[in-house]
Image (cartoon, rainbow, N blue to C red):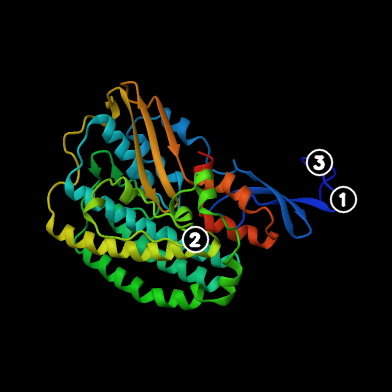
Amino acid sequence: MYSENYRPTEQLASHEFELYFGPNHPGIEGNYALKVRLNGDQVVKITADGGYLHRGFEKLMEERLWIQNVALVPRICVPDPVPMEETYARVVEMLGGLEVPERAQWIRVMMLEMSRICAHIFTFGGNAATIGQYSNMFWGVSDRDRILDLFEEVTGARVYHMYVTPGGVRRDLPDGFLARLSQLLDYLDARLPEYEDLFFDNPVVQQRGKNVGKMTQEQALEWGVTGPNLRACGLPYDVRRNDPYLVYEQLEFDIPIEQGGDVFARMLVRRAELIQSIRILRQVIEKLHVIKGAVRRCHLPNPLAWNIPEGDAYARTESSKGELAFYAVSNGTAKPWRVHVRGPSSMHAVQVLEKLCIGQRVEDIAQIMFSLDACPPEVDR
């Protein structure tokens, strides 16, 4: 029932009605809302309505010291915080002319790929929950916790690590950590066939995902889609390969693609990316057994009076959500003059979601949302 003060956003046809979808719903990772106009159970129009979560990150960063923002940026995307830390650190390093020690670069790649696995497992579980398959969600939460245990061992924190800092990383890996990581990768390798049986080979999952929320490669490019959502349309574009950073050019990995462009294709790409992340981490483990030395630049200025030279810089990363970038401008003081976050979620959760839901059924909205894998805090940045 609508309240007596409710007024439709515009004149509705006699057979149409509006409802509010959110602002808290399992179809997306955080507080978010949609204004949905329906004709029966079919979506006629949908309007994204954000602003319920963390807001104004960019302005907050401009009011804080360069080093203080290390603690702020992970909150822009809770399920995949490491790319935020790494990209911000790299843009500061570009402005300040800092070189990162080789061992620290390999550790950063390790953290990025562990975070990617966490995020993709989280997405599988969320997508499954939107169609009532809670077993897969519980599995995902449990397996993700095993990775969070390792994050906690390295950084002291399970989610907001604040571990990647300008000039390197905060500290080296604990004794025996690489062996424990290798054991976890063995566990995940053995676990994947079970996910196949429960989720990807499930006829209900396939029926609910195929030809739902479909977009063509031409549409994806026109709308600015990146990451797994773009690769699910058949385009093998990945920043790690097309514009390498850190030590990715030294690693062997494939860029998975699918041709369907629908909900199921987007899940298949993330499944394949998880396998590639395991492959990357095994190579990183081998390298870290050999590469020794410092993990951070030792001669950083006093962080409370760190005046970054004037200039601007742009750094980008392939996060689990798509292409993430930071643009920062320094006026030579201890605070950024301007910081802009180019997050993939702001495109996927607004313009793309609004287009893909048209003509779909109301029960498919949550699935489409989760298949696009957006972070609401990043939209509200």
**Residue designated by label 1:** 14
Element at label 2:
helix
**In the image, farthest residue toward the front:** 218
Q: Label 2 crowding class (10 Å Cα cut-off): few <14, some 14-19, many 20+?
A: many
Sequence-wise first label, 3 or 1: 3
Element at label 3:
loop
Q: Which mark is residue 7?
A: 3
Q: Are marks 1 and 2 in contact (CB under 8 Å)?
A: no
Judge whether 95 appears above or below 173 on screen.
above
Q: Label 3 crowding class (10 Å Cα cut-off): few <14, some 14-19, many 20+?
A: few
Sequence-wise first label, 1 or 2: 1
Tell me the kind of residue under disc 1.
Ser
Closer to the camera: disc 2 or disc 3? 2
Identify the residue at image location x=50%, y=63%.
Answer: 265
Where residue 203 sits, quadrant-wise, is bottom right
Identify the residue at image location x=62%, y=49%.
Answer: 355
Q: Which mark is residue 266?
A: 2
Identify the residue at image location x=53%, y=73%.
Answer: 135
Image coords of residue 90 (percent x, y) = 30, 39
Tell me the kind of residue under disc 3.
Arg
Query: How much space separates mark 3 and mark 1, taking CA atoms?
Result: 15 Å
Q: Which mark is residue 256?
A: none
Sequence-wise first label, 2 or 3: 3
Res. 138 visible in picture: yes
Judge whether 295 appears above or below 208 on screen.
above
Image coords of residue 300 (percent x, y) = 20, 33
Query: How much space separates mark 2 and mark 3, taking CA atoms?
Result: 37 Å
